[in-house]
Amino acid sequence: MENLVIQTEKLSEWVNEVIKKNKVFAPVKETDFSNFKIIDDYSEIDFTYLLPRVPAKKILFKQTETLFLFTPGSKGSVQTKEISDEKLVVFSLRTCDAKTFSILDPVFLGDYADPFYKSRRERSILIGLSCNKPNVNCFCTSFGDSPASSDYVDILLTDLDGKHLVEVVTERGKKFIDNYKKFFTSASKEDLDSKKKVEEQAIKGITRTMKLEGIPEKLDKMFEHPIWYENAMKCIGCGTCTFVCPTCHCFDMQDESTLREGARVRVWDYCMNPEYTHHASGHNPRPARMNRVRNRIFHKFNYYPINDNIVGCTGCGRCIDYCSVNIDVIDIINKIGEAES
Amino acid sequence: MTKNSEGTFEIQNPYQPLLAKVVKITNEVDGARAIKTYKLVFQDEETKINFSFIPGQFVMVSVFGKGESTFAISSSSTQKDYIEISVMKHGKNTAALHELEEGDIVGVRGPYGNTFDVKGWEGKNIILIGGGIGQAPLRSVLNYILDNRDKYGTLDVIYGARTSSDICYKEEFAELEKRDDVNVHLSIDVEEEGWNNYVGFVPNNLMEVKPSSENAIAITCGPPIMIEYVIQNLLKLGFTEKQIYTTLEMRMKCGIGICGRCNIGNLYVCKDGPVFSYEQLKGLQGDM
C-alpha cells in the first residue's frame, strides 16, 4: 500500500509516541528468554530475541479471561463483564506469530463470535518485524510463508542496518501510520531491493523443511496407523507443546468464587491431559497418550484443512524447541509422508 | 455492540448464561446414581416468550460457583414457557444441582447443537430405543410426537434400565402404557420379583419386539455399548443406515465449537452434533 523508511535512531521516538496513546505489547527480556509484555518505554524492548517464548496469541486470547461475574449459590445472579475499548499495538511480531490470527479467526469469529477475541482483534494493530536470522527449528517457508512476509500484519518493519523499511500493508495500518507522519520518509527502490536481499538471506537461514504436500489427504487414511503408537511413545503428556503453540486454542471454563462473589474464568487448557476429555461417567474417548498425540496432529494437519482450509501450524518451531523429550513435529509429518498408508 | 456511558463496550456474550428458576423437581431415581428432572422457567419475560428449540438440542446449565454442564433438553418444544432437563448425580455441578430446591436459580445457555428432523419424519413409524438416563433426549422426541400424534405412524418405545428402581420417568411410562397409540416395551437387566416385562439388555429386547423397518425411523440413546449393539441389531432387522439416528455426548465447556474438546474427527459434537445418523456416524473417524 505504501512503503516508508524510518531511521533506526528515530525508532525509539516513534514507539514512545505510540505508547502514549496505545497499550503496546513487545518482546521483553525475562532472564534467558523473551516474552510479550506491555511496555512503558522503547528501551524495554528486546531486539536480540528470535521468538518470544509464549506466542503472541496470548495478547488477543488471554491465558486467563473473566467471562462474566456472578453471585454464587442457588439464588445466584450474573453480571456482564465489560470489555475495554483500549487501543492495542503488538510490536515486533514475527511472521509465524502474526499468522496465528489468520488461523484463529475462523475459530473465534465463526458461528458464535467470541466477544473478547473479537474486540481485541478489532482494536489492535499488528506491527511485524522481519526475521533476519531465523532459529534452527524455524520452518515457516514450508507453508509458503517468508520470514519477511507482510501477509498477516498491518505494518511490517525490516531492519536494513541503520534504517528500517516500513511497509504499510492494510488500510488500518495506513490510518495508524498517518498519525506519525513526521517520523517517516518515502522508501526508495534501493530500500526495497535491500529488503529483498535481507529476505533472501533469511530464507537461506531456514534449514528445516516439513514436506506438507498431500499430508492432509493422506492422514484421512492413516487414523489407525501404527505410527501413532511410535510417535506417542516418548510423550510425557506435559502439554508444553500446546502452551507454546501459536494456534492451540483449547480452553477450560472454571468457576472461581468466594462466598459472596465469583467469576467464570476461561483458562488455556491442553488436549495432552487425560482429564481434558474425561466424562463425568468415567468414560474417556481419548484414554491413552496415543489418542491424544494423534488428535493433536490430526487437528492441525487434517481437521483444520478440512474445516477452515488452512493448516493449523505456522512453522514457529516452538514445540520442537521446548519439548522435554525431543518430539519433533517436522519429523512426524515427514515420516507420515514416507509411510505406507 | 453498544457503547455505554463509561466508554466500554457491551457485546453479546455467548458465555454468559440467562437466569432460570427451578419451578419443579421430580425425583426419578434414588441411590448412588440418583436422577432428578428439573423444570426450568426463564426469569426474563422476553426470553421466556422467545426461547425456542427443536428436540435433540441441548443446554448448558450452571449452578453459580460450582460449574456448568451439558444436558439434553428432555421436554418437548411443543410445551411452551419452560424446559426440562434430567440430571444424573455424577460430578461437582450435578451434585450441586441435586442439592437445589424448588424456587432456586440456575444459569442456562443454549439451545445448542443440531436437531432431530422431527418435521421430516412426519408420516413415519417411530421407534425410540433408550437406556438409563439416555431416555432424556428421546423423551423430547416422544412428547413432541404425542403432541402431534396424528402426523406420525406407529410409535414404539423400547426402554431399559439396570433394575426396576433405575427406570427413569416411571410415572410417565405408566401413563404411556395406558394409551393405545403408543407401544411401550420396558426391560430390566436382571430378574426381579414382580417384574412382568422383559428381562435382559435393551438390544435383546429390541430383537424380541422386532419392529418393522418399513417406513420407519429408529432413534437410540444410552450407554455407548448399548448404542453399538442396538445399531447392529437394527441393521439385522433390515433398517438402513439412513433410518437409524443417535445422539452422542462428549465433555463440553463452551458448547459453541470454540473450546476444542468435544471433537470426533473434524466434527464438534456441540455444533455439528449431537444428533448423528448412523450413515454419518459410520463415516466418522475419531475417538469416541
Image: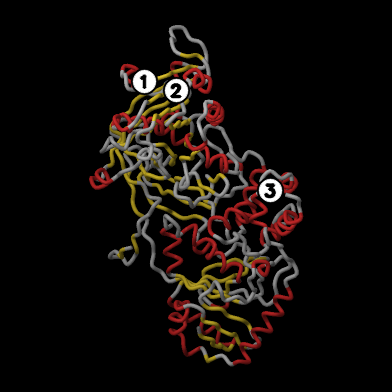
Quadrant of residue B24 within the rendered picture: top left
Q: Which residue is mark 1?
A: B173
Measure how far apart labels 3 and 1 are at the Cα level.
Answer: 46 Å
Please tell me how many numbered marks the rendered image carries.
3
Rendered location of residue B225, percent (x, y): 56, 29
Nearer-the-camera pick, A335 or A38: A335
Kindly indicate whether the residues beneath marks 2 and 3 are on one polypeptide chain: no
Kind of residue at disc 3: Met
Residue at coordinates 39% horizontally, 64% vertically from top-left?
Answer: A84
Foreground: disc 3 or disc 1: 3
| Picture coordinates of residue B132, whole percent (x, y) | 46, 25
Residue sticking out furthest to the top: B193
Q: From what the image shows, is residue B187 above or below residue A2?
A: above
What residue is disc 2 on? B159
Viewer-proximal residue among A15 and A138: A138
Look at 57% across and 59% down and name the residue there.
A247
Q: Is residue A132 above or below residue B274?
A: below
Alpha carbon separation for disc pair 2 and 3: 38 Å
Q: Are marks 1 and 2 on the same chain?
A: yes
Residue at position x 52%, y 42% from top?
B280
Q: Position of residue A293 (x, y in %)?
A: 66, 48
Colour setup of the view: secondary structure
Residue type pointed to by label 2: Tyr
Label 3 crowd (10 A; few <14 / some 14-19 / many >=20): some
First reached walking from the N terminus: tag 1 or tag 2: 2
Marker disc for residue B202: none
Verify CB contact (< 8 Å) between mark 1 and mark 2: yes
Q: Is residue B59 left or right of residue B237?
A: left
